[in-house]
Image (cartoon, rainbow, N blue to C red):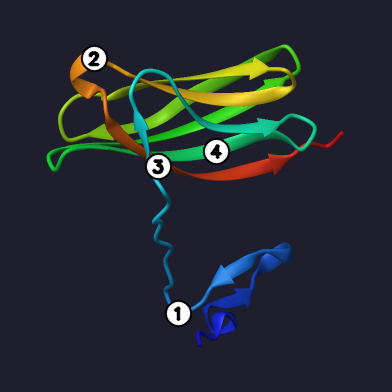
């Protein structure tokens, strides 16, 4: 059994500090991007913003990672990509929309050749203050 407490310490101002030069690795389930893929969705009453790291893979040679920020109000969603790296060309387009009080993050293939790319993500959600 893993003693998870040995990997964390109390940080400054109520934060959690990784002990012993620890790191995180992600192994989330992937979804295929065929046309328009709803990658994630959250209710605006719970969260107001989110930060995403999105991993895209198409075969063994075509890979991409995207860092983006999303924020939303009941009538509008905004997304900004602030980091993107690819071994070839951009594989997907990313958008955010508001649908029935939910924010939805959508991926679509950049070209027909990009259809079927595998997408996974990690997110940090920021709670709404209302």
Of the image marks 4 and 1, the number of the one nearer the N terminus? 1
* Cβ–Cβ under 8 Å for marks 3 and 4: no
Q: Is residue 45 left or right of residue 99?
A: right
> Which residue bears the numbered disc 2?
111
Contact, mark 3 vs mark 1 (Cβ under 8 Å): no
Tally of numbered discs: 4
Helix, strand or loop at label 4? It is strand
Identify the residue shown where x is 68% and y is 67%: 12
- The residue tagged with tag 2: helix, strand or loop? loop
Q: Give the camera-side residue of 74 and 100.
A: 100
**Mark 1 surroundings: few (<14), some (14-19) or many (≥20) residues within 10 A:** few
Residue assigned mark 1: 20
Q: Is residue 105 above or below residue 58?
A: above
Tell me how far mark 3 sits from mark 2, CA to CA: 19 Å
Q: Which residue is mark 4?
A: 51
Label 3, on which residue?
A: 120
């Amino acid at each position: 059994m893993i003693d998870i407490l040995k990997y964390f310490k109390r940080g400054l101002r109520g934060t959690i500090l990784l002990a012993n030069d620890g790191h995180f690795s992600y192994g989330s389930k992937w979804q295929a991007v065929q046309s328009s893929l709803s990658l994630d969705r959250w209710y605006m009453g719970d969260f107001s913003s989110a930060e995403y790291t999105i991993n895209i893979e198409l075969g063994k040679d075509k890979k991409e990672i995207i860092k983006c920020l999303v924020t939303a109000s009941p009538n509008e969603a905004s997304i900004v990509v602030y980091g993107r790296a690819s071994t070839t060309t951009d594989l997907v387009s990313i958008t955010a929309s508001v649908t029935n009080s939910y924010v939805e993050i959508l991926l679509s293939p950049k070209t027909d050749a990009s259809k079927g790319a595998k997408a996974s993500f990690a997110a940090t959600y920021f709670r709404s203050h209302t």
